Image: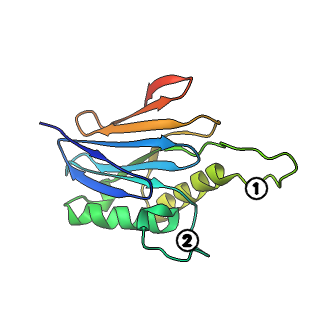
Amino acid sequence: MENTYHVGMADLVVAVAPAKLVTLGLGSCIGLVIFDSIAKVAGMVHIMLPDSRGARTTEKIGKFADTAVPALIDEMIKKGASKARMKAKIAGGAQMFALPGAPTDFLAVGSRNVKETTAFLAKAGIPLIASDTGGNKGRTVEFSTDTWMLTIKTLGKGKAEI
């Protein structure tokens, strides 16, 4: 029987198959999944911000791309995954708000989250094999270790699998 794990904002969860990892309400946030299908280990993190510089606390390690990516990899290795076999998929990174007259980059948290998450994956040598990012709609994602697919439900757009 498949266990279902709900990954809250700034949370990080690693599971061994059979498992389903779910995170709700991705706007500018990133739903990052890293998996090793041979070891049957998968992890998901709900990243809220691109980096922890200037943060008062980094208590929630999954909150920032720069702390979440290495922590997720380390937790997966503890469960038996091999870094050499890991692959990644991401969704989210939408531009949810626009303020007339605001600097373009001011509210572009979504695109900055995508950029930083992909940069940290590249730095770790983890290939990003699929993504569904950008736009201005919220997403809910679900990853199943039965199929190793990331199912994305986008408001007003329907369902897709990557």
Q: Which mark is residue 72?
A: none
- Residue pushed farthest left? 1
Relative side of 162 to 115, left or right: left
SS state under label 2 = loop
SS state under label 1 = loop
Foreground of the two, 112 or 28: 28
Earlier in the chain: of badge 2 and badge 1, it is 2
CB of mark 2 within 8 Å of CB of mark 1? Answer: no
Quadrant where the C terminus lies?
top left
Q: Which mark is residue 52?
A: 2
Foreground of the two, 86 or 100: 100
Residue drawn at x 56%, y 23% as measured from the top left: 156
Relative side of 34 to 49, left or right: left
Q: Position of residue 121 (x, y in %)?
A: 47, 58
Image quadrant of residue 21?
A: top left
| Residue 17 drawn above or below residue 59 | above
Q: Amino acid at mark 2?
A: Ser
Q: Position of residue 81 (x, y in %)?
A: 24, 58
Crowdedness near tag 2: few (<14), some (14–19) or many (≥20) residues, C-alpha within 10 Å: some
Residue drawn at x 59%, y 47% as measured from the top left: 28
Q: Disc 2 and disc 1: Cα gap in Å?
A: 17 Å
Foreground of the two, 123 or 51: 51
Q: Amino acid at mark 1?
A: Asp
Residue drawn at x 39%, y 51% as measured from the top left: 8
Relative side of 121 to 111, left or right: left
| Residue 12 drawn above or below residue 40 | below
- Residue pushed farthest right? 101
Relative side of 154 to 60, left or right: right
Q: Position of residue 95 (x, y in %)?
A: 66, 43
| Residue 133 drawn above or below residue 29 | above
The residue at which mark 1 appears reads as 105
Residue drawn at x 44%, y 58% as measured from the top left: 10
